[in-house]
Amino acid sequence: MRVRAVGGGMALAFTAGFNLANIGAVASRIGDAYGVGLGVVGLFTTGLFLTHAALQVPMGRLCDRFGSRVVGGAGLLVVAAASTAALGWRETWFAIGMRTVAGVGTAATFVGGGDYVRATIGSPLALGFFGAVSMGSGGLALAVVPLLPGWRAPFAAAAVAAVAGFALVAIAPREPRLPAIARALSVVDRRLLPLAVMHAASFGLSVVLGNWIVTLLERSGGESEHVAGLIGGLVLFVGVVSRPLGGRLADRPAAIATSFLIGGLAIGVLVAAKPAPLMIIAATVLGLAAGIPFASALSGAQRLRPDAPGAAIGAVNMIAATVILIGTPLLGLTFSLPGGGRTGFAVVAVLYALAALAVRRERNLVSA
C-alpha cells in the first residue's frame, strides 16, 4: 500500500512540474511555428499559471473536503484533455486557451499531490521527494522536449505524462480524511507569508528562469537548442537530489538561508551566458540550492494550519504561482532590451538572494 501511495503522489508531482517548463524548452521553435515573438510565447506559460495560481487555495479546500487523491486524479484528466486538444489546431489564441485550461489541472495535481503525500506518508522527507519529482520533471522537460520533433512536442509529451500518471493514481490507496469540522475552517493566515516568500523564490523564480535559460544560452551564449536545453534542465532537474535533502534540513534555518544566498550568486554567474562549462556549474549549483527550502515551506504551512493542510499548501503555492505568472512574460520581454535578457536575469539574482531574509521570520512563526 505504501508503494502505491508513493507512486500516486509522485505521479501528481510529475505532471505538475512537467507543464511548468515544457513550452519554455522550445520557446524559439514555438514562436517560429506560431509566427509570434517570445513575449507572446511567454503567454503560453502565463495562461497556464493564470488558472494555476488562482485555484491554489480553492483546490486545497476541495482536497480538505473531498480528498486529495480524487482532486489530483481529476486534475490529471484535465491536463490530458487540454494538451490533446492543443495538438489539433496551430492557432495562438487556441493554444493559450488550452494552456489556461491545463492550469486548472496542474493546480489540482500539485496541491492534491502535496496533500496526498502528507496524508499517506506524512514526513518532511516525503515532501522533499514530492518536490524533487515536481522539480525534476520540469528539468526533464527542458532536456527531453527539444529532442522531440515539431511544434506539437510539448503538448504531446504533457498528454502522455498525464495519462500515465492517472493510471498510477487510480491504483493508489485512499488517504485518511479530515474531520468535517476541520475542513470548514478558514485558511487566511498572515503567518503563511514568510513561507510563501521562501517558496516563491526557491520554486517560483527557478521556474521563471527555467523557462528562459535555454533562450539566454542560445542567443547570448551561442549554444545550440539541444545543448542549451541540457544545461538549462539542470536548474530544475538536480532538485531531485536537494529537495529530499531539504526535508532533512527543514529544522536548520541557517542552512536554508544560505541556500538562497548561494542560489542568488549562481544566477549572477548565469548572466554571463558563457562559457558552457561555467554555465553547467552555475546551473547545477542553482538547482541544488533551489531544492533546499521546498520541504521546509510546505511542512511549515501544514504545521501552522493542521486544521486545513490542503488549503495551507494552496495558499503558500499560490504566491509562487503568481510569481511565475507575472515573472515569466516579464523576463521574456527583457530579451528585447540591450543585453538580451541578461538584465532580467540580474534582477532575479538579487530578488532570489533577498529571500534569505524570510527564513528567520518563518522559523519564529513555526516555532511559536
Image: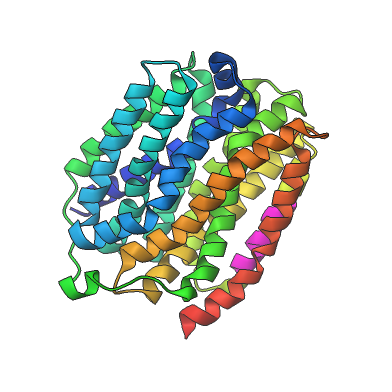
In this image, 104 relative to 38: left or right? Answer: left
- Which residue occupies 61% across, 68% down? 255
Give the total number of marks visible in the rendering: 0
Asked which quadrant contains residue 73, the reply is: top left
| 261 within the magenta span | yes
Q: Residue furthest front?
A: 93
Horizontal relation, residue 96 to residue 225: left or right: left
Q: Which residue lies furthest to the right in this view?
A: 338
Magenta stretch: includes residue 206: no
Q: Nearer the viewer, residue 313 or 256?
A: 313
Using residue 353 as the reference point, say whether residue 53 is left or right of it.
Answer: left
Asked if residue 17 shows in the view, the reply is yes
Residue drawn at the location 49% of the way across and 51% of the way down? 321
Q: Position of residue 310 (x, y in %)?
A: 32, 62
Residue shown at the point (48%, 82%) measured from the top left: 367
Residue 78: percent from the left, percent from the top?
29, 36
Name the chief secondary structure element in magenta. Answer: helix
> With respect to residue 138, does 261 lie above or below?
below
The magenta span reads 255-265
| Residue at left offset 51%, top offset 63% | 196
The colour style of the image is rainbow
In this rendered view, identify the residue nearer to me: 205 or 296. Answer: 205
Q: Name, please, the residue furthest toward the bottom.
A: 368
Residue 151 in percent (x, y) is at 49, 17
Query: Foreground: 21 or 4?
Result: 21
When the figure is inspected, residue 232 is found, relative to residue 84, above or below; the finding is below
| Residue 316 picture quarter | bottom left
Up the image or down, 182 lies above or below 326; here it is below
Q: Can residue 21 be seen in this view?
A: no
| Position of 244 relative to 164 (above/below) | below
